[in-house]
Amino acid sequence: MDRQDGNAVETGADGDEAWWKSAVVYQIYPRSFADSNGDGVGDLDGITSHLDHLVELGVDVLWLSPVYPSPQADNGYDISDYQDVDPLFGDLAAFDRLLAAVHARGMRLVMDLVVNHTSDRHPWFQESRDPASPKRSWYWWRPPRETVDPNAADPTAVDPTAVDPTAVEPPAAEPNNWGSFFSGPAWTYDGASGAYYLHLFAPGQPDLNWENPEVRQAVYAMMRWWLERGVDGFRMDVVNLISKDPALPDGPLRGDGLYGDGSPSYLCGPRVHEYLQEMHREVFAHHPGRLLTVGEMPGVTVEQARLFTDPARVEVDMVFQFEHVSLDHGPGGKFDPRPLRLTDLKASLARWQQGLADTGWNSLYWNNHDQPRIVSRFGDDGPRHRVRSATMLATVLHLHRGTPYVYQGEELGMTNAPFASIGDFRDIEALNHYAQALAAGQEPERVLRGLRAMGRDNARTPMQWDATPGAGFSTGTPWIAVNPNHTTVNAADARRDPGSVYHHYRRLIALRHSEPAVVHGDFTPLLPEDERVYAFTRRHRGTTLLVLGNFTGEHVPVDLPPHWRGAELVLGNLPAAGAEGPAGPGPGTTTVLAPWEARVHRITATAGESTR
Ligand code: NOJ
């Protein structure tokens, strides 16, 4: 993509040259990025003042997590006004300044769109609490269930964090047995209404009823308003949950033994494709070729993703799938992690690469604001291997076919945080899980171990700009503690060190922009049974790239096909080529990868030659 003249090369979501295929997206979690006014919370002016870091990194698109007015029950994923900015982050004027500054630097800005649910403080929801209101059917209100199936989950089990203080009398039972994603039931009783409302997430996040065409039109109008203001697309929060089976039937008991799993009734529900096609017609079609749309889709399968991203169906450009970031979840779920098997990771990503090879497009990510830091998760965050393993992981990811997403701090090799006690956590998911697990008799230290490894707060500690006490994030008291390792892991030091994680990301992004095989090449997995080495090729016209990543702290020999002998090393992560092993595949057909080493080799065929 020509970064200074992006519009010139756009052909739209249905063209082969869609600009976002060669783009790299950088996610900003505004709360934790840069605080310009010393209140301990990041803000829009803070982002504007750090844009040059992103320009030098080379990214094309910024995705902002929500900055709309919100009670912040889920850090802004609970929106009370879709067409304004929360004073915590600034105002619409600050937003317009940021957008203009982003565009002036040849980048684009994508907003988070959270329309599976609103905040319970949204005027739509407040109005809907009156049973006679025309907005009643904008949400999922249901009367208490009087008769209770004795085989269902305990209908009286109540999460103390989910109790509605306005309830005037105890309800008979929730309308169905569904549990929420944030512990406790998916229903809260509202005394003023005499009914329960559905919330797949926190009680402060009631689900919108997309069956109602007025809801859909209100959402589309709001989306058009942002696009007319100049934003360049949307990352669409849990958008495969918007269509629900209106019968809302009980689900099978979940692993926690407390609640039913409602997902068969709402994961990629009956009308989801119809809604997304309607959204495309009503909103995206007015801006042909200009936008990037990515749907966050928990539980989506490759087959479903093909449908969502098939350009001929005009739904979304790409989806965020969750398979590869669920492979280390244990029998007790995400907070019961188990070690990753590399062969599982390779098999999963290869299926997605192959499943979307001809139709559709992949997004590529290790990190976002919901995932623990990748270097702590699949790499080694100790001082000896942090840089090497972070750069190896980056290389492997960015050389896949798809659009890579970099989450703030990932380009510095930021690590998980040393949370000492539950008091150090801020995330509603972590706090509710802790309360529910302890109430169920689990041992606190064991629960904390799960939260330390997998908790979302790991991603949300402040961006580490420099080694000063506030890490250059804030002059005030940050809303969540700065990771003490900011004295050695920070942007200022990384920018000065050519061997840093930051400069490696810069080189990877530059390679994507200069080497068409990175964007367009086909994908062939190699060594699928090897538990230590990740290997694949990408082939485009006469060029083949060979990508190797050592997922261990040991030296590992790799046998290569003979034609890779002496191939050019395009990119590697050793301090100096050859310092710890042969720079190229060497004279034989066996090469030895240093601990956590990554390499990208290239061969270019002369006419008629195969480069496989
Ligand atoms: C997915 C978002 O990424 C996450 O942060 C949020 O808690 C849920 N959706 C609910 O909006």
Image (cartoon, grey):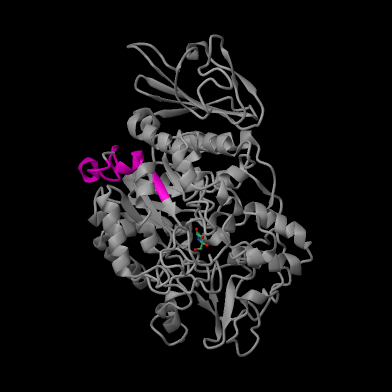
Q: Is residue 151 above or below residue 348?
A: below
Q: Is residue 469 magenta?
A: no
Q: Is residue 206 left or right of residue 168?
A: left
Q: Residue 531 is drawn in which quadrant?
A: top right
Q: Position of residue 482 (x, y in %)?
A: 56, 58
Q: Residue 5 is drawn in which quadrant?
A: top left
**Residue lying at 22% horizontally and 45% vertically, measured from the top left:** 7
Q: Is residue 504 above or below residue 85?
A: above
Q: Nearer the viewer, residue 39 or 191?
A: 39
Q: In this rendering, does residue 520 appear at all?
A: yes
Say how many tags the image has: 0
Q: Position of residue 455 (x, y in %)?
A: 62, 56
Q: Is residue 539 left or right of residue 106?
A: right
**Residue lying at 45% horizontally and 72% vertically, measured from the top left:** 70
Q: Nearer the viewer, residue 457 or 101?
A: 101
Q: Is residue 361 above or below residue 467?
A: above
Q: Nearer the viewer, residue 399 or 311?
A: 399
Q: Position of residue 301 (x, y in %)?
A: 51, 46
Q: Residue 480 is drawn in which quadrant?
A: bottom right
Q: Is residue 465 left or right of residue 487?
A: left
Q: Is residue 548 left or right of residue 23?
A: right
Which quadrant: the N terminus?
A: top left
Residue that lies at the very extreme toward the bottom in this rendered image: 168
Q: Which residues are magenta?
A: 3-26
Q: In this rendering, does residue 221 appear at all?
A: no
Q: Nearer the viewer, residue 451 or 494?
A: 494
**Residue lying at 43% horizontally and 80% vertically, measured from the top left:** 136
Residue that lies at the very extreme toward the left in this rendered image: 8
Residue that lies at the very extreme toward the front in this rendered image: 468
Q: Position of residue 486 (x, y in %)?
A: 56, 51
Q: Is residue 5 magenta?
A: yes
Which quadrant: the C terminus?
A: top left
